[in-house]
Image (tube, rainbow, N blue to C red):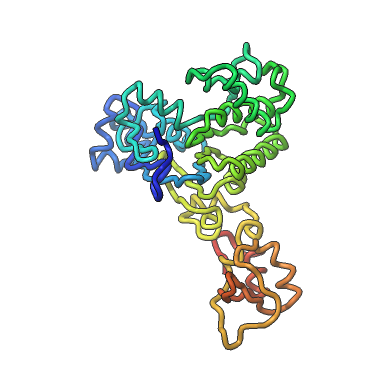
Amino acid sequence: MNTTPEAGEPAVSVRGLWKVFGPRARAVPGSSELSALPRAELLERTGCTVAVRDIDLDVTPGEVFVVMGLSGSGKSTLLRCLTRLIEPTAGRVAAAGEDVLTASRSRLRELRRHRFSMVFQHFGLLPHRRVIDNVAYGLEIRGISRARRHRRASEVIELVGLNGYERSWPAELSGGMQQRVGLARALAVDPDVLLLDEPFSALDPLIRRELQQEVLRLHREVGTTMIFVTHDLSEALRLGNRIMIMRDGAPVQCGSGQELVAAPADDYVRDFVRDVPRAQVLTLRWIMRPPDLRTCPNGPELDPDVPVLDAARTVLEIGGPVRVVGNGTVLGIVAPQDVLDVVTGPVGSVA
């Protein structure tokens, strides 16, 4: 069976997804009155709590899509709804075009075994199995022979940098190493979509950053589609091609890290990005002005995707406008004041 999305087809597509807990849960999505109520008022009137509220999203093949928000925002519930670890109340979830919510129990098991893999915050390793058998566990469930699954497990163990630890027990490993085993176990089954639910939040900052780098490297080398849940904005900015910020179960804004930092949709997002060093996140594409070809300066040319911080020295040393050029075409100009505004200006303003 081919599990690869057709050209132009999302790896995961979600439409009108709701998860409501409570005695009248199914009545909420279908009621224009109830579905419009704030979370606290809905709870008071019906005894129901909305965890996920009318989510629409498409994740493209090969994308790292980050879902973030504060505790209780619904991000982990959303992730679990995608594979029906939590049953949605209403809506549609499709994986490579296949409707997950109408799948039979047997078909759902197949989807979880072949199309999705999940990495949790708590490692969930089997303490009575050595590293190589933990990594090979998903392949064992599929009925793969011991020789084949160990061969594949060894490949993935090398990929995550755990060579030499194949025969170790989980209790003999550090927290960071145990999480690498969890990553290896998820990758061993070659999933279409890798779901990661705050996998590094229990780790110390140095190990956390190391594993973030590991995820980026694995993504470059393997190209697996990833949906990554976190409450940490710096982690989201570092990993995500796109980021969706949630509040009270609903999406507030979805876009690239640069879009969120340069143009926050409201005060909630603005507060999220307030402490972000914008000169490290924004590129010249976001601050350049339209070029005047009659007076466009000669001299250095800068790529539009260069971070403002990296371009600052060149622009400030020139002391005047610098051309921004992409594919041989002058796209705009950047002046010293444009750079200084990003470094010192208010959050949410790039000019």
Q: Dividing the picture into quarters, in which one does residue 34 lie?
A: top left
Q: Is residue 102 visible?
A: yes
Percent x, y of residue 192: 47, 36
Left or right, 192 with respect to 313, comes to left
Using the image, determine if residue 316 lies above or below residue 171: below
Give the farthest residue toward the bottom. Answer: 294
Residue under the image location 55 percent in, 19 percent down: 137
Using the image, determine if residue 317 lies above or below residue 200: below
Residue under the image location 46 percent in, 43 percent down: 246
Residue under the image location 30 percent in, 43 percent down: 36
Q: Is residue 69 visible?
A: no
Using the image, determine if residue 155 lies above or below residue 299: above
Residue under the image location 68 percent in, 29 percent down: 176
Q: Nearer the viewer, residue 120 or 303?
A: 303
Give the farthest residue toward the top. Answer: 128
Q: Nearer the viewer, residue 129 or 6?
A: 6
Left or right, 232 with respect to 98, comes to right
Left or right, 73 with respect to 108, comes to right
Percent x, y of residue 97: 35, 40
Using the image, determine if residue 261 lies above or below residue 86: below
